[in-house]
Amino acid sequence: MSFTVEERGNPNSLNYRLFFKNADGKYISPFHDISIYADESQNIFHMVVEVPRWTNAKMEIATKDLLNPIKQDVKKGKLRYVANVFPHKGYIWNYGAIPQTWEDPAHKDSDTCCCGDNDPIDVCEIGSKVCSRGEVIKVKVLGVLAMIDEGETDWKVIAINVEDPEANNLNNISDVQRLKPGYLEATVDWFRRYKVPDGKPENCFAFNEEFKDKDFAIEVIKSTHNFWKALISQQANAGELNCKNTCVSACDSPFCCSADEAKAAVSETSPCGKEEPIPSSVDQWFYYEKK
């Protein structure tokens, strides 16, 4: 399957949106309409890239908006950028989510003793290529980190693009430790400290900050897929989430979005315009002593 994206609004502005289309040119939701699996028999998953490596803009699938386009997170009316906490620059992996997954905020995880964060499960893709925003890639799962973010379970899947030159050599989290020494430690450090410049406390982790292996990670992903299935079949409380989709739900479902409704939703947004400048403060480096 192939997917394309359509930019609307002005990049680096509050009105910027990135909508998705399938191979037929039909508008789709990256949350609901892109299959979780690229190859189920081989446990190869789709990943929607929200943030290319080295960039700072906190882009994410808009789970509460119709068609769930990618947009930049907003805090107190301002666009959100992650800080560069020394020695890191922006995101240190291609960052995104696995479609058709959901971390249920009503489910308390037995391992973390915390409920889900109400988002699709996050992925850190550690390959050599810097991906593009909105790119849909096929990834091999290597392991997972259990982050606790302000009292919520926030799994971080470690994966690699199946087309990466190193993909054949990386088959489990132990291979990452062996072939990319320091990368996993840097990942824990990044997630622990990235909110501190915003006045937040350091994040903490389950399992004594240890990464769990591939098999454990795949079971976590499958469980979040089951939560998503309950969500899309109206067996779980959607709350403010927008579950409308153009390919999954039956015509008589309230979650079914017609092609005309989807087109109308996109046309109501601003056409793609001039890129706004990124504030110079985004390049600032933050230093503080590790605890």
Image (cartoon, grey):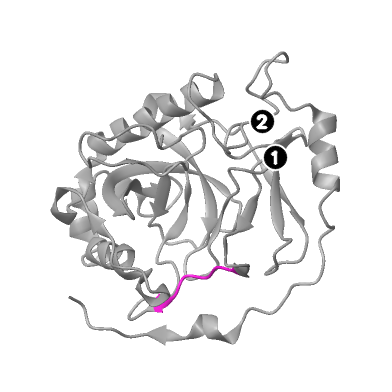
Q: Residue at x 61, y 52 (%)?
A: 134
- Give residue 44's quadrant in the image: top left
Image quarter of the N terminus: top right
Q: Do the CB atoms of the residues marked 2 and 1 lie less than 8 Å apart?
A: yes
Residue 244's tag is 2
Q: Quadrant of the C terminus?
A: bottom left
Q: Residue flagged by tag 2: what amino acid is it?
A: Lys
**Residue drawn at the location 61% of the way across and 43% of the way down:** 64
Q: CA distance from mark 2 to mark 1?
A: 7 Å
33 in magenta = no
Residue 208 at least partly seen: yes
In this rendered view, identify the residue nearer to me: 136 or 179: 136
Question: Which region is colored magenta?
Answer: 79-84
Residue 154 horizontal/vertical position (percent): 35, 48
Q: Secondary structure at mark 1?
A: loop
Can you identify the residue that label 1 sits on? 66
The disc label shown at residue 142, or none: none
Q: Looking at the picture, which amino acid does disc 1 mark?
A: Leu
Residue neighbourhood size for the residue with mark 2, other residues' Cα within 10 Å, grouped as few (<14), some (14–19), many (≥20): many
In the image, residue 220 lies at what x, y percent? Answer: 31, 34
Q: Is residue 161 visible?
A: no
Q: Position of residue 259 (x, y in %)?
A: 81, 29
Q: Main secondary structure of the magenta part?
A: loop
Depth check, front residue: 135 or 145:
145
Count the marks: how many? 2
Q: Is residue 134 left or right of residue 6?
A: left
Measured as percent of width and height from the top left, residue 242 is found at 62, 36
